[in-house]
């Protein structure tokens, strides 16, 4: 059997995935294994692992279109064009799903996050980069056109951003207190509040040695592979002060907050893609 799936197979798989995404956004319990087994009955001899990979492909497409993905399905960009077309078409005719995504992106975070215990135990390894699409570079394939960038909308959610910064302040204080550096913990500064947003980082903390640790906090309620957005200033400061600079990526923030650290020059740490340009009259 060839690699490309038929339209019937693709339609059924996309429908099953988007149903899971809708349930996840609305906090309705569902079982991924049950969903895969139901798909096996309508697909043409596909295996569960093949369905898993196709769901990963859908995750990659959703992120490219500005939507969140289902937790646990790591984005995999080696997808067929038909799959992209079907996902996009479904999203354009899914007002209930898009409303649920917008609600989540704009929703403030409740007090449960502030009660999180064992802050230092919330650190996880940085996720591996998604696999590239085989046989074609990003420049060789059609550029996805986001339908509405709900990931960027969430990134502009100031209440969510502030909650993430407050979480990080507590995390840093705990880190330094446990290291016996109490005086340094007391000197941590919430820079985005005391100096504004123009410094290129949100929090001034310290290494155990006393050296500065400049922290830019990026918070999402979605999964660890959700892209984050950086400013020109943040990129510049991360390059000028790479030995001191960290991005703290907080994810799953509403339900089970965790974080991973991205140290150093942002241009060397992540793949950057231009989403806006500054236009000046000639």
Image (spheres, rainbow, N blue to C red):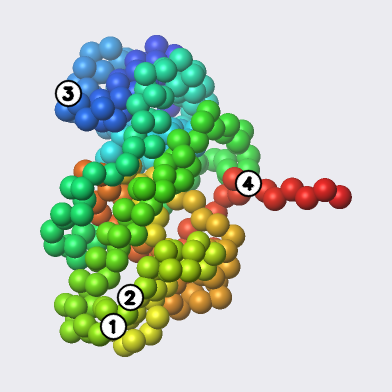
Q: Nearer the viewer, residue 16 or 178?
A: 178
Q: Residue at x 46, y 39 (%)?
A: 153
Q: CA distance from mark 3 to mark 4?
A: 41 Å
Q: Secondary structure at mark 1?
A: helix
Q: Residues at badges 1 and 2 in contact (C-beta under 8 Å)?
A: yes
Q: Residue beneath label 3, please?
A: 34
Percent coordinates x, y for residue 280 in the rendering = 78, 50
Mark 4: secondary structure: loop
Question: If you read the primary sequence from the N terminus, does the residue marked by circle 3 or circle 1 appear first?
Answer: 3
Q: Residue at x 40, y 55 (%)?
A: 218
Residue 82 visible within the image: no
Residue drawn at the location 63% of the way across and 46% of the way down? 276
Residue for badge 2: 188
User: How far from the left and from the top, in percent, is residue 213?
Assistant: 39, 76
Of circles 2 and 4, the one toward us is: 2
Left or right of 153, for residue 108? left
How far apart are the alpha carbons under marks 2 and 4?
33 Å
In the image, residue 77 sits, relative to residue 17, either above or below, namely: below
Q: Which residue is mark 1?
A: 184
| Alpha-carbon span between mark 4 and mark 1 | 38 Å
Within 10 Å of disc 1 (Cα), the crowding (few <14, some 14-19, many 20+) is some
Q: Earlier in the sequence, mark 2 or mark 4?
A: 2
Is residue 27 in view?
A: yes
In the picture, which quadrant includes the N terminus?
top left
Q: CA–CA distance between discs 3 and 2? A: 48 Å
Q: Residue 221 or 165: which is nearer the viewer?
A: 165
Which residue is denoted by mark 4 in the rendering? 276
Q: Single out the mark in the foreground, 3 or 1.
A: 1
Q: Residue at x 27, y 70 (%)?
A: 172
């Amino acid at each position: 059997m060839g690699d490309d799936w038929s339209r019937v197979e693709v339609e059924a798989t996309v429908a099953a995935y988007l149903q899971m995404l809708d349930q996840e956004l609305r906090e309705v319990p569902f079982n991924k294994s049950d969903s895969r087994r139901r798909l096996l009955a309508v697909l043409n001899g596909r295996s569960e692992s093949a369905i898993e990979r196709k769901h990963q492909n859908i995750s990659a497409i959703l992120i490219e279109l500005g939507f969140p993905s289902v937790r646990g399905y790591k984005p995999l960009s080696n997808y067929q064009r038909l799959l992209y077309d079907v996902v996009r078409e479904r999203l354009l005719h899914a007002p209930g799903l898009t409303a649920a995504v917008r609600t989540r992106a704009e929703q403030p975070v409740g007090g449960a996050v502030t009660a999180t215990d064992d802050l230092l135990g919330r650190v996880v390894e940085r996720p591996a980069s998604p696999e590239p699409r085989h046989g074609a570079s990003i420049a060789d394939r059609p550029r996805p056109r986001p339908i509405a960038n709900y990931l960027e909308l969430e990134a502009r959610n100031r209440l969510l951003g502030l909650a993430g910064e407050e979480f990080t302040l507590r995390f840093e204080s705990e880190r330094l207190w446990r290291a016996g550096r109490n005086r340094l913990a007391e000197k941590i500064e919430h820079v985005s509040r005391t100096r504004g947003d123009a410094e290129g980082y949100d929090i001034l903390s310290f290494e155990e040695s006393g050296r500065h640790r400049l922290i830019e906090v990026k918070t999402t309620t979605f999964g660890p592979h959700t892209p984050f957005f950086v400013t020109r200033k943040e990129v510049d400061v991360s390059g000028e002060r790479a030995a001191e600079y960290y991005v703290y990526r907080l994810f799953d923030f509403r339900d089970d907050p965790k974080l991973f650290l991205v140290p150093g020059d942002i241009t060397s740490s992540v793949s950057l893609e231009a989403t806006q340009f500054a236009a000046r009259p000639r």
